[in-house]
Amino acid sequence: MSSASSHPTAGPDRRTVVAAVGAAGLAAALTACGSGDDSAGTGSSGTESAATGAASDGGGTALARTADIPEGGGRIFKDQGVVVTQPTAGTYKAFSAECTHQGCAVGSVAHGMIVCPCHGSEFSVTDGSVKKGPAMKGLAPARITVSGDDIRLA
């Protein structure tokens, strides 16, 4: 009167193996989608502003000083998910740092373009519009305030 369930197995059953292989494949795919250059490359210094945190009276999150944003270029603030540009002297713009093609984080700002390192899409520092695909939609605008020399995420 023995049943199949009374026999010990020598290793993992087929379902366990298939599930483990599927989970490993999913983890690898997710890692590949999220990988890329983690540097906040820009037209100048290539580093993020250390001035982050809650603002006092003005509200919003402190991002940078106006002098930190090069004219004709910009800086990427990965923690806040925005890129701030200065297309012309004294004019500051902000856009989402998420590429509209497949959601990668943009990686650099150079020569008047915001560049996604994943597939090479390029966006204008002036208005976030697509200048080179494969992205077909421009970067979403982000709200910032400029007060004196301070730039804050609104």
Image: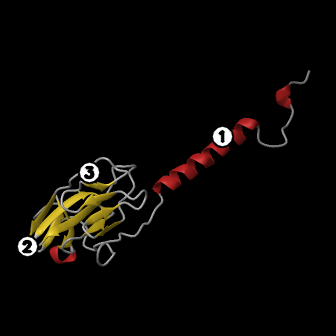
Per the image, label 1 sits on a secondary structure element best described as: helix
* Relative to 133, 145 lies left or right: left
Q: Reply above or below: 41 against 116.
A: below
The outermost residue toward the top is: 1
Mark 3, other Cα within 10 Å: few <14 / some 14–19 / many ≥20 = many
Observer-side mark, 3 or 1, equals: 3
Comparing 50 with 68, the one in front is 68
Say if mark 3 contacts mark 1, CB within 8 Å.
no
Return the x and y of residue 15 as percentages of the image width and height: 71, 36
Residue 2 in the image, given as x and y percentages of width and height:
90, 24
Residue under numbered circle 3: 138
- Residue drawn at 10 percent across, 64 percent down: 58
Which label's residue is closer to the chain start, 1 or 2?
A: 1
Give the left or right position of residue 118, taking residue 109 as reference: right
| Residue visible at 48% across and 59% down in the picture | 35
**Residue tagged 2:** 148
- What kind of residue is marked 2? Gly
**Which residue is identified by label 1?**
19
Q: Secondary structure at mark 2?
A: loop
Classify the position of the N terminus by image quarter: top right
Instruction: Tell me the CA gap for discs 3 and 2.
Output: 29 Å
Between 92 and 135, the one nearer to me in the picture: 135
Please give left or right for residue 37 compared with residue 148 in the image.
right
Task: Report the Cα–Cα distance between label 1 and label 2.
Answer: 57 Å
Q: Is residue 56 left or right of residue 9?
A: left
Nearer to the camera, 54 or 107:
107
> 134 above or below 120?
above
Per the rendering, the mark at residue 120 is: none
User: Residue 56: image x %, image y %?
Assistant: 14, 66
Amino acid found under the numbered disc labelled 1: Ala
Amino acid type of disc 3?
Gly
Q: Secondary structure at mark 3?
A: loop
